[in-house]
Image: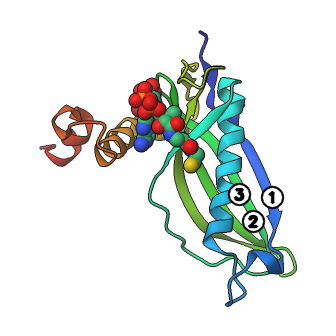
Amino acid sequence: MDGKKAVESFTVMNELVLPNDTNTFGNLMGGRLMYWMDIAAGIAAGKHCNAPSMTASVDNLSFKNPIKLGNVVHIEAKLSRAFNTSMEVHLRVWGEDNLHQYKYESNEAYFTFVALDPNGNPRKVPQLIPETEEEKKLFDGALRRRQLRLILAGKMKPDDASELKALFFAK
Ligand SMILES: CC(C)(COP(=O)(O)OP(=O)(O)OC[C@H]1O[C@@H](n2cnc3c(N)ncnc32)[C@H](O)[C@@H]1OP(=O)(O)O)[C@@H](O)C(=O)NCCC(=O)NCCS
């Protein structure tokens, strides 16, 4: 199976924040944003593996700035690494005030998707080829993030997470 470049999965999604998307403060609800991020990440994963895939996990999400009613949500998603059957998708989110012409950071997150075969079992995905410096940095960090999330999910023993341990015990 040939590898695919990170840029091939690049996905941009824009949504307008309407009244039904907001909380009582007139800001975008976190849950609605997560829904849109899940879709953008799923599209990026699909571009990479060309197969149906499922969200396996979402890393911790924190919101830096609220996105206002009437502003545009701009989501960019791109694969940061592919493993055996799973793919880590890196997302960045901005709010855009087109009236006053400024853009503000909302959040950044990592979603993990697993590709499935027609029987619903995990299937192999192409390896990811990072090209830019930023893609290479995200690619390297993905190994540690994967170990941390598998430990938290009870699917890996901390002792087996050598790259993660090296981070804590580096001299
Ligand atoms: C995701 C899912 C397919 C994994 O199935 P599984 O039986 O645990 O399969 P495996 O243990 O063989 O793992 C398959 C891959 O998933 C990864 N994985 C499993 N649980 C994970 C987790 N909590 N976080 C990140 N990756 C995970 C494994 O690391 C493995 O990746 P790899 O092949 O690249 O090494 C299964 O747990 C599932 O269907 N979950 C529900 C998904 C869902 O409904 N999502 C929508 C939101 S409700």
Tags 3 and 2 in contact by the CB under 8 Å rule? yes
Name the amino acid type tagged 3. Trp
Name the element at disc 2: strand
View extreme (bottom): residue: 25
Can you say whether 31 is above or below 19 in the image? above
> In percent of the image, x 40 and y 40: which residue is there?
141
Residue 87 in the image: x percent, y percent? 53, 33
Name the element at disc 1: strand
| Quarter of the image with the N terminus in it | top right
Tags 2 and 1 in contact by the CB under 8 Å rule? yes
Around disc 3, counting alpha carbons within 10 Å, would you say few (fewer than 14), some (14 to 19), or many (20 or more)?
Answer: some
* Disc 1/disc 3 C-alpha distance (Å): 9 Å
Color theme of the render: rainbow
Beta carbon at label 2 within 8 Å of ligand 1 = no
Q: Nearer the viewer, residue 98 or 18?
A: 18
Query: Residue tagged by mark 2?
Result: 73
| Quarter of the image with the C terminus in it | top left
Q: In the image, is 69 to the left or to the right of 111?
A: right
Q: Is residue 136 visible?
A: no
Name the amino acid type tagged 1. Asn
Q: Nearer the viewer, mark 3 or mark 2?
A: 3
Query: Residue tagged by mark 1?
Result: 14
Name the element at disc 3: helix
Can you say whether 43 is above or below 160 in the image? below
Which one is earlier in the sequence, the residue at label 3 or at label 2?
3
Residue 82 in the image: x percent, y percent? 52, 28
View extreme (right): residue: 99
The image quarter containing residue 35 is: bottom right
> In percent of the image, x 31 and y 37: which residue is there?
155
Q: Is residue 74 visible?
A: yes
> In percent of the image, x 36 and y 45: which residue is there?
149
